[in-house]
Amino acid sequence: MLGITDIWTYVLGTVAIVLLPGPNSLFVLSTAARRGVPSGYRAAAGVFVGDTVLMVLSAAGVASLLSAYPPVFLAIKWAGALYLGYVGLAMIRGAWRRWRSPAPAPAPAADEQAFHPFRRAAVISLLNPKAILFFISFFIQFVDPAYAYPALSFLLLGLIAQLASTLYLTLLIFAGTYLAAQFRRRRRLAAGATSVAGTLFVGFGLKLATG
């Protein structure tokens, strides 16, 4: 079908990979929980852009370059680990300040300009080894090299992946909205949940650095 060798295997595999917990989905969920639906979708848009860039690079042959030169992939892996650790520590610091402060937490829009959910999500996506490995070892395997229009095959595969991601991230965003309603009434609960999310980000970074 349009140069795709086994589309249903690809669909099932993509859904399974999207559902695996990772830094992208956790960042979108935590952003929606702390700052609401609009910020959640800004973070999701960053994930979509980052994934799209990885898809284009994979189609252009960069995936083969990373496979042929492991030190390049290792450098990306370490950069991703450091950035995830940075994001996690920033979340933990913010949660600690919220826990100690007697004042109510600021409104979600108050620090939106400084937070940049779109930019952070895009960087997390671009430096996410899980996503890079997906496009290196899985994504390109379903394109028939004998098909006359491989760009069309990559486009269809990319649309399927983005559709699965959109549906899943939308579910997380509205789940985060429910959590936000609970957090507004329980400031220390919000701080505790943010600390847990930050700790998970640090854990993701350590796992990448040592794996």
Image: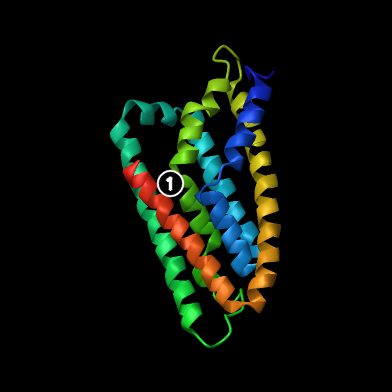
Quarter of the image for residue 61 reads top left
Considering the image in quadrants, where does the C terminus appear? Answer: top left
**Can residue 37 be spotted in the picture?**
no
Image point (37%, 27%), residue name? 67
The location of residue 29, given as percent across then percent down, is 60, 57
- Does 96 sit above or below residue 83? below
Q: What residue type is labelled 1?
A: Leu
**Can residue 112 be spotted in the picture?**
yes
Query: Total of numbered circles in the picture?
Result: 1
The location of residue 191, given as percent across then percent down, is 53, 72
- Does 99 sit above or below residue 14? below
Image point (57%, 20%), residue name? 143
Image point (39%, 60%), residue name? 86
Q: How is the image coloured?
A: rainbow
- Does 168 sit above or below residue 60? below
The location of residue 182, given as percent across then percent down, is 67, 71
Q: Secondary structure under badge 1?
A: loop
- Does 117 sit above or below residue 203? below
Which residue is the extreme one toward the left?
A: 71
The location of residue 12, given as percent across then percent down, is 65, 29
Residue where numbered disc 1 is placed: 127
